[in-house]
């Protein structure tokens, strides 16, 4: 009897399926990146779009991995065995990654509520004192600012959301102090 290349119960079939899932992920994430670049040219504020693009790309890989793990019988049994230890590991990782998770939640808040946007000019207190800078990027973990002296200021989002930031060029009116 011949070996079926698409039989996920054999190593060769599982490898073929894995390569297929990986290729599909690469194609889908490439499409998402191209689509994002095309839309960016029509928007004045790309912060939310960039976040959605990064989130969609991660989601594509996550869904593909879950589907692949469900397709391969050995991974299903391994997944069941690993599931018993996930609760302990998640508590340990949660405690270890407290700052990172705080920055992630703060980044989501910055993207959703948009107290600052890419291109805004802001003032905030840094270790060097009061700094005036332009917002260049708001990502999930940090906000990248360009100081008036040309230096980069990288601010963790948890600090950005809990600090008083003065937006100097508020499009809705005069300069205001916003607790972001």
Image (cartoon, rainbow, N blue to C red):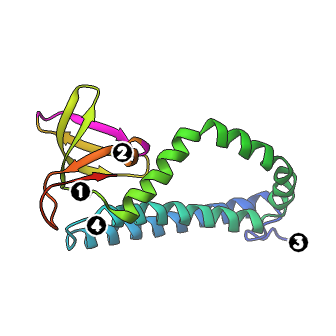
Q: CA distance from mark 3 to mark 2?
A: 64 Å
Determine which residue is flagged by label 1: 118
Write down the quadrant of residue 21 in the picture: bottom right
Q: CA distance from mark 1 to mark 4?
A: 16 Å
- Mark 2 or mark 1, earlier in chain: 1
- Mark 3 or mark 4, earlier in chain: 3
Residue 160 marker = 2
Residue at 45%, 65% in the rendered image: 29
Disc 1: CA contacts within 10 A as few (<14), some (14-19) or many (>=20): some
Q: CA distance from mark 4 to mark 2?
A: 27 Å
Determine which residue is flagged by label 4: 37
Residue at 34%, 39% in the rendered image: 155
Q: Is residue 167 above or below residue 149?
A: below
Of marks 2 and 1, the one in the foreground: 2
Q: Tag 2, which secondary structure?
A: helix
- Mark 1 or mark 4, earlier in chain: 4
Determine which residue is flagged by label 3: 1
């Amino acid at each position: 009897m011949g070996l079926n290349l698409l039989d996920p119960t054999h190593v060769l079939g599982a490898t073929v399926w894995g390569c297929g899932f990986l290729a599909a992920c690469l194609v889908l994430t490439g499409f998402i990146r191209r689509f994002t670049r095309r839309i960016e040219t029509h928007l004045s504020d790309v912060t939310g779009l960039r976040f959605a693009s990064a989130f969609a790309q991660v989601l594509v890989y996550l869904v593909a991995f879950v589907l692949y793990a469900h397709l391969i019988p050995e991974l299903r049994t391994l997944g069941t065995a690993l599931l018993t230890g996930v609760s302990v590991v998640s508590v340990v990782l949660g405690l270890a990654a407290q700052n990172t998770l705080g920055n992630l939640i703060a980044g989501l808040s910055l993207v959703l509520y948009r107290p600052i946007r890419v291109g805004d000019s802001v003032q905030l207190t840094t270790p060097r004192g009061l700094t005036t800078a332009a917002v260049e990027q708001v990502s999930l973990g940090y906000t990248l600012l360009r100081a008036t002296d040309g230096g980069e200021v990288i601010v963790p989002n948890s600090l950005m959301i809990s600090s008083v930031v003065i937006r100097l060029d508020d499009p809705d009116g005069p300069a205001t102090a916003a607790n972001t």
